[in-house]
Structures are given as C-alpha cells and as structure tokens.
Amino acid sequence: MPYYLDLLFKPRLDGGELKPKELESGGVDLFDLGLIQNVIAGQPLANWREVGADEAKSLRPELLFASTDFPMGPGVMLNPGDKNQLLSGVNGAVSFSGGKIEVRQVIRHEGDVGPRSGNIFFVGDFQATGTVHSGYKLQARNVRIADAESGSQIKAQESLFIENGVIGSPKTVMEAGANLRAGFCENAILIARGNMLIEKSCVNCKIYAGPYLAVRGTLTGRKAYVREKLYVGERLGSKMGANTQIVIGFDPSLLVKAKMLELAVRELRRRQDEYQRQVDAGDNQTDEFARRLDNAMTKMTLLVQQKRLVWDQIAATTSSLEDGECCVIVPGQIYPGVEISIGPYHYEVEEPMQNVRLSVKDHEITITSPAS
C-alpha cells in the first residue's frame, strides 16, 4: 500500500516561471511572486497519508512512497508526539528540492531582486549577487547585496551590507537593526541602530547612525544624526559650500520614531481639517463626519502624548558630552557650509579646516588638532 506525502506548503514541483499572487478581488500582485515560503521552528510541514492503488494513479509520483520514512533534508525534524508528521526545526525557507524537504536559514540568490523574483520577505539571511530594482522591497534577518537602485527599500533585522552602493531618491530607504555597511551612497535615507560604515562617499543622504558613523571618503549634503562619534576621512562638506548638518549626542532610533510620529500628526491634522469642513457643510453625511472627527481628535491626543514621551526619552538618553566621547573627527578637510551640533551646542564652519577634532569642553564646542 503506497503512502502519499501530504505537503503543508506549496512546492514548486514543475519549476518554471514564478506567478503573481492572486488577490481576492480577482487581480494579481505583481510584486508578490512567492519565491520564498517562510516557516518557523515547530511548524508542521508534511503528513503521511495511506492511499489505495487506484487513488495513487491520480497523484504525483514524486510524492508517493513505499514507506513512512520522511525524505528529510536540513532544518527539519520529526514530531516527537506524532511519527507521521514532519516539523520545521528552524526558522527559514521551506522547499521540496531533490526529493527532500528542507528548511534553509540562508538563501543565496543568483541575480536581482526585481520582476523575476518579486519582493523578498525572509525570516533568515538573504544574499543576492545582483541589484534591488526600483520599486522593490527586500526584508530579511541579515542582508548582503551588490547594489540598490532609486526607489528600492531594504530592511535588515540585523546587519545590512551593500557591496557596491546605493544610487537613490527620497523614497530609497536602507535600514539595519544592527550595523550597516556600503561602498557608497547617494540620495538615500540610511538608518542603522548599530554602527555605519561608508567605504567611499556619502552624498545628499539623510543618515541616522548610532553609536558610530565612519565615512572614509566624502560626506556632504543633507543631515546626519549620530549617537556618539563621526569620522570622515577625506572631506566633510564641499568646496561649493553645500549645506551639511551634523547632529551628535542623541539616540537616532528615537529621532526616527519622533519623525514618524510628527508625520502621523501632520496627516491626522489634515484629515481633521477635512472632516471639519464636511461637518460645517451640513450635508446628509454630517453625522458620519462628526463621528470621524471625534475619533480623529481622540487619536490626536494619543499621538501627542506619544510624541511628548519620545522627546522625554531623547532628552534622558542624551550621551555624555563633556567626556569627549561625542565628537567629530576629520583627518582631511572640513569646508564652509558645514553645521555641527553636539547636544545643545552649535558650531558653523566659516573657514576651511584640516585635520581637526570637534568636541565639547566647558559647555562649548572646541576644536583641536591633530584629529587623532
């Protein structure tokens, strides 16, 4: 009597091109191709089912077996309480490949993240040899890629490594829960709750890094928030006087949270104004808009409280300023147009400087040379 391997996930038995996810509305999601099927440790993956000879003829032959010995690959385990059930032993991507069920914690993807792969959401580590295309999203535990295009969004729960670099836009976001490292970055938002290293240049980027940010080449344009220490090897600012703002001494992750709350407050205020106009118009939907306005006012109260709490946390976690740990170190050049804030203290660069360290002493920003 044959046994049928009843898989509790969708195997790609036929290979071929990935297909967009079908939506309940009847349309398809072109960005969701189901390249990766995530599972968590302890999740059931397969059961055995005894089938008759006639039924077996209508089933896929690669899923029919003569015994109940599971075709086990890496990352799976038998259910201790049910020998006829297979479980995932780890968090990862499940597949039925080479006649075996396996769960991989690391995926090495040959090629790009784009139209052929769709968006990537993975509970394990993801590596790609190519580029994350414009408009696509990649999220995984640890991420290593070659490049990122304008409009792409990458989020690593832990570390993010971009081998070459990022050519972005205001919607390009690179975020790491731990460390972030890239060859170069242009016109992007960079967020790292750990340290950040840019091997070459960083141009017109908004940066949130903590505790350390190191740029071996040039840092110019926009704004960088750093918890404790900024190192720029060659040039901070530019000869053309591009405005470059540096803020040291605050927890960048809290600043990001404060920014998101501020955006939420602005959007809710816009909706409040719209609801108020509808109420004042006095049409047949006045009661509905009055209800929405009341709900919006309640939400606004909560948002304002959250915003106040975050800023209290920012003030409470300000790094020690007088011990020299919060500083800007530039062995190369600093150009006019650079503004440096360390905690509440502010300094505007008016003349070119070289090989200097800026830190706080006696309640003001002081400049010493050499930088080291």
Image: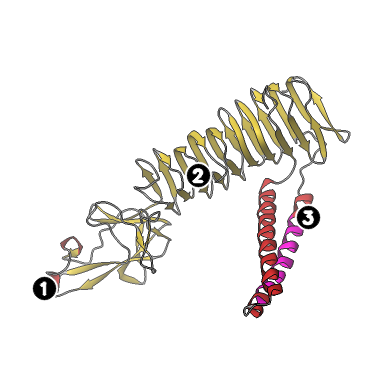
Mark number, residue 312: 3
Tell me what residue is drawn at x 58 percent, y 34 percent. Answer: 197
Marks 2/1 in contact by CB < 8 Å: the verdict is no
Residue 176 occupies which quadrant of the picture?
Answer: top right
Tell me what residue is drawn at x 23 percent, y 72 percent. Answer: 49
* Horizontal and vertical percent position of residue 312: 78, 55
Tell me what residue is drawn at x 37 percent, y 43 percent. Answer: 108
Which quarter shows the N terminus?
Answer: bottom left
Closer to the camera in the image, 280 or 119: 280
Q: Is residue 207 above or below residue 302?
A: above
Residue range (magenta) = 291-310
| Label located before the other in sequence (1 or 3) | 1
Q: Is residue 220 above or below residue 267?
A: above
- The residue beneath circle 2 is 151
Amino acid tagged 1? Ala
- The residue beneath circle 1 is 53
| Label located before the other in sequence (3 or 2) | 2
Question: Label 3 vs label 2: CA separation?
Answer: 33 Å
Q: Is residue 290 above or below residue 74?
A: below
| Principal secondary structure, stretch drawn in magenta | helix
Query: Would residue 137 be found to the left or right of residue 93 on screen?
Result: right
